[in-house]
Image (spheres, rainbow, N blue to C red):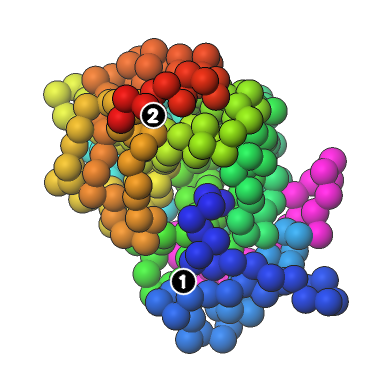
Amino acid sequence: MFEEAQYFAPVVTHDDGTLKVQLGAGHPGFADPEYRRRRDALATLASQWQPGQPCPTADYTDAEHEVWREVSEALVDKHRTFACQEYLDGKEALGLPKDHIPQLEDVREMLRPLTGYRYRPAAGLVPLREFYGSLADKAFWSTQYVRHHSVPLYTPEPDVLHEVVGHGNTLANPRFTALYEAAGRATNRVETDEALQFISKVFWFTLEFGVLHEGGALKTYGAGILSSPGEIEEFRGMTIKPLDLVDMGTTEYDITVYQDLLYAAESFSQVEDVVGAFWDSCTDESIAAMKATA
């Protein structure tokens, strides 16, 4: 869903309206014709959605449900050990199934009484401004495909496990959704691409790959880590820097590997006070001034 994903698996449209996902040669599903067919079918399904309609129902296979089960079960104990309390609170409130992939519309209904957030199906890349801007309206663009079965513990692409297990549990907690909405309002406020990129990088290093100190231990609140049974065991060994808006907003990163640079907040409250306040007040001019100090 992030712009960098375009280089990994761009989506093209055929004359008949069907979509083709262009997997890179290094993708684990590149040489798997059945997986490629499923990716194309799910992308085409999502592309047929129109605003105001329910999210389309994906007819998941037994193999896809098995990947969901394997990842969900692997994350149970890891979440207890490594996830921050706000994420655990959201996870308990949402109560996602562990034995099958829930439909996006079902998760939307589960979120309705908690925070009112809703999902929108995405065929692939959603432009940054549209993706982040929709957060202000309590809408989250989500893919529906499942990572390849050969590498269930990690994916550099935002599959349905990332979107629902990673982000869905945060979207069930009002403290998290206040941050998502603030990021959306900031996106809709700025006009330059440079400011938008800065906002997106701060989002990356916080709501995607953020960590914080809690109870004397380093915990994570980032959806990218929380949806990866592999990466969640490694993040404490990465380079950890204090929360720094300028550094986060100007640092490049590689989506195809475990993130080796993370920014730690002293608490979830500091994320709200620093990052939330930034998104609430930033402008093109203030971001340009911040970048000038980098």
Which of 46 and 293 lies nearest the eye of the viewer? 293
Image quarter of the C terminus: top left
Magenta stretch secondary structure, dominant: loop
Tell me: residue 73, above or below residue 188. Answer: below
Q: Position of residue 21 (x, y in %)?
A: 62, 72
Q: Amino acid at mark 2?
A: Lys
Residue 155 appears left or right of 36 = left
Q: Which residues are magenta?
A: 48-69
Mark before the other along the chain sequence, 2 or 1: 1
- Provide the secondary structure element on which disc 1 rests: loop
Q: Residue at x 67, y 54 (%)?
A: 122
Which of 164 and 225 lies nearest the eye of the viewer? 225
Residue at numbered disc 2: 291
Residue 125 appears left or right of 216 = right
> Which quarter of the figure has residue 51?
top right
Viewer can see residue 172 = no
Residue 115 appears left or right of 49 = left
Q: Residue at x 67, y 59 (%)?
A: 123
Using the image, tell me which numbered label, if any, was put on residue 148. 1
Closer to the camera: disc 2 or disc 1? 2
- Provide the secondary structure element on which disc 2 rests: helix
Q: Amino acid at mark 1?
A: His
> Which quarter of the figure has residue 137?
top right
Q: Residue at x 46, y 34 (%)?
A: 198
